[in-house]
Image (spheres, rainbow, N blue to C red):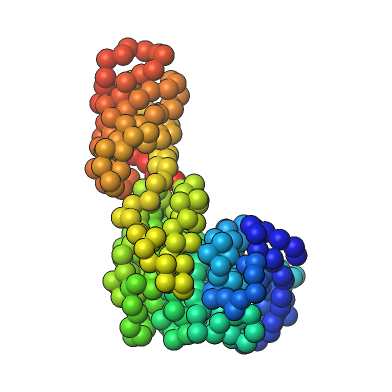
Amino acid sequence: MGMQGGASVTRITYPSPVVTPYPEDNTVTAYLFLPSGTGPYPAMVVLHEWNPSSTRAGFGLASAAARANVSALVVVEPYSLNRRAKNPKGTAPAILSGNLPEMVGALRQAVLDARRGLDYLSRRPDIDPQRLGVGGISLGGVLSGLVTKVDPRVQATVTLVGGADFARGFWVGLLTRKYRKQILRDGYTYDEFLRAMAPIEANHWPRPIDPANVLMIDGRYDLVILPRGAKALSQALGDTRIVWLNSGHYGASLSAKPAAALTEQFLRARFYGDRAAYHPPDTLPSKTIKLGFLIGGHEGLSPAIAYQVIDFDRAGRYSLDGQLTLHGLSAGLSARLTPTLALGLEFPLFHGDVKPKPYLLAHIVL
């Protein structure tokens, strides 16, 4: 395929260890990133986000690994990209869906495909089989935690906006609400759903993990992978320290550069002993963007977009915001009451009375 970020990229395929009724899904496509030089290199399997329309995020993580002189194999997950079933009878299969047996099977297949990717890497003469790892983004982060727990070859793990206790978050999630309804229509109870999903939960597997071998980066205000899910994965991975972003799930992409830089430092520390340069912070620089409705202030009621210009504390609970409403721009002194509710004082800019007025902002964080 050529070069990307200083690494050579080669497309490979291998048979999935799971055979499904869909031929397209039974061959795994993967993209091998090799750093410049001769090796043998450390290497990691990279798992992407849920049903991406491109490999951009996975390639970004693989490029960060290559800059740390670590090879990376980006594995396309079941029913994603070119592995989507063509003209299936009935509803198209998906890695996440309301078909509970099919979903559990697809998630299990994703883990087995990743482990076969580790097999492939360990057999290459330019890869050191004693220095293998796994990394993932979003759903890929969830799966990476599970691969870490079930495969003793994994010596380093990177998860970006990933978590554990996944089934509980799936059950209450806004994006998966329609799947929950289908699961209930199919006659499963919540407890039956949890039991069915238990094998794909990283926190249900007993293998002990050294927290020094793990980097976790998560969104403090994530409503997709909830913070409690991030904490559950942290506990499963040896109580590793979480590096927080003051963002939600999708806003984490705006922190790609500092996250990539920290990933490079971690991989060099883990695989090359360069520990002096690796000092994980509690919080990475991030952009906090709030979308919601402003109640009170000078508007009475208005849709609003707020950007936290200055954070007065590490967790971004208290901030000076720039706000855009139906009436124009304003500044707000904001104090977070809950992850989705903030109390503040509004100061209009270029419109209305400059006298500050109190408001509530009901919102989600991007």
Visible residue check, residue 314: yes
Please state the horizontal and vertical placement of residue 253, each as a whole percent of the image.
50, 51
Q: Is residue 264 left or right of residue 27?
A: left
Q: Residue at x 35, y 59 (%)?
A: 280
Which one is in front, 365 or 66? 66
**Up-down relation of residue 300 to residue 170 (above or below):** above
Q: Nearer the viewer, residue 49 or 243?
A: 243
Q: Name the spot of residue 240 as percent of width and height, x first.
A: 31, 69
- Relative to 341, say whether 232 is above or below: below
Indicate the quadrant where residue 57 lies.
Answer: bottom right
Image quadrant in which the N terminus is located: bottom right
Which residue is at a point 44% across and 27% down the rendered structure image?
Answer: 324
* Vertical order, 139 against 110 (above or below): above
Image mark count: 0
Any part of residue 193 in sight: no
Q: Is residue 287 above or below residue 326?
A: below
Question: Where residue 22 appears, x then y in whole percent?
Answer: 70, 79
Which quadrant holds residue 66? Answer: bottom right
Front residue (pair 236, 52): 236
Residue 31: name its quadrant: bottom right
Q: Position of residue 192 (x, y in %)?
A: 38, 79
Which residue is found at the position 26% from the left and 37% from the top? 312
- Residue at (38%, 54%) from the top-left corner? 219
